Amino acid sequence: MNIRITASLLVAIMALSGSAVATPAFLPEDPKRPVDKIGHDLNIRPEQFTACFRKVSPAPQETRPTAERVHSNKAILLSCLQKANANITNDRLDEVMDRYRPGGREAQLPMNE
């Protein structure tokens, strides 16, 4: 009887582990951004992207950023990411972020443009 319970628990743990691996990693403060995919596309570890992104201050949900906020966040994010991978360019960062940003490029256009 104990063997059956142990086997059942082992199967349940393996099933849970498999589903956890298949779930994309998201930033807790921005659950729509798949950091595992962004990290892959920028050739950095997801943890590196998360650490850099925590230094920026995105516009609140459903609002558009000011031009000042866009430029400030970009400078902070790009310089931090380039420490992890010096080959990341402004254009590459834009391309990757636009791919995964809710609302795409449009959502990042400053409100005064």
Image: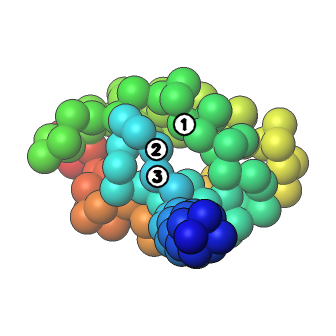
Q: Which residue is mark 3?
A: 26
Q: Nearer the viewer, mark 3 or mark 1?
A: 3
Q: Residues within 10 Å of mark 3 (few under 14, many from 20)?
A: some
Q: Is residue 93 visible to us here?
A: yes
Mark 2 secondary-structure assignment = strand
Residue 50 sits in quarter: top right
Residue type marked 1: Phe
Q: Position of residue 97 (x, y in %)?
A: 50, 59
Say which quarter of the image contains residue 2: bottom right
**Element on which disc 3 rests:** strand
Name the residue nearer the viewer: 53 or 74. Answer: 53
> Residue 45: horizontal and vertical position, in percent?
75, 52
Q: Which labelled disc corresponds to residue 87? A: none
Instruction: Indicate how the structure is coloured in the image.
Output: rainbow
Q: Residue at x 71, y 41 (%)?
A: 48
> In the image, is 77 to the left or to the right of 105?
right
Q: Secondary structure at mark 1?
A: helix
Task: Identify which amino acid the numbered label 2 is placed on.
Answer: Leu
Q: Indicate whether 9 appears above or below 50.
A: below
Q: Residue furthest right?
A: 86
Quarter of the rendering occupied by the N terminus: bottom right
- The correct choice, above or below, for 76 with respect to 37 in the image is above
Question: Hey, which residue is sitting farthest front in the picture?
Answer: 1
Q: Compare marks 1 and 2 and give the one earlier in the sequence.
A: 2
Q: Is residue 51 above or below residue 6?
A: above
Q: What amino acid is found at the position of numbered circle 3 in the picture?
A: Phe
Q: Measure the alpha-carbon separation of dots 3 and 1.
A: 12 Å
Look at the numbered discs 1 and 2 and tell me whether their residues touch, using CB distance below 8 Å. Answer: yes
Residue position marked by numbered label 1 in the rendering: 53
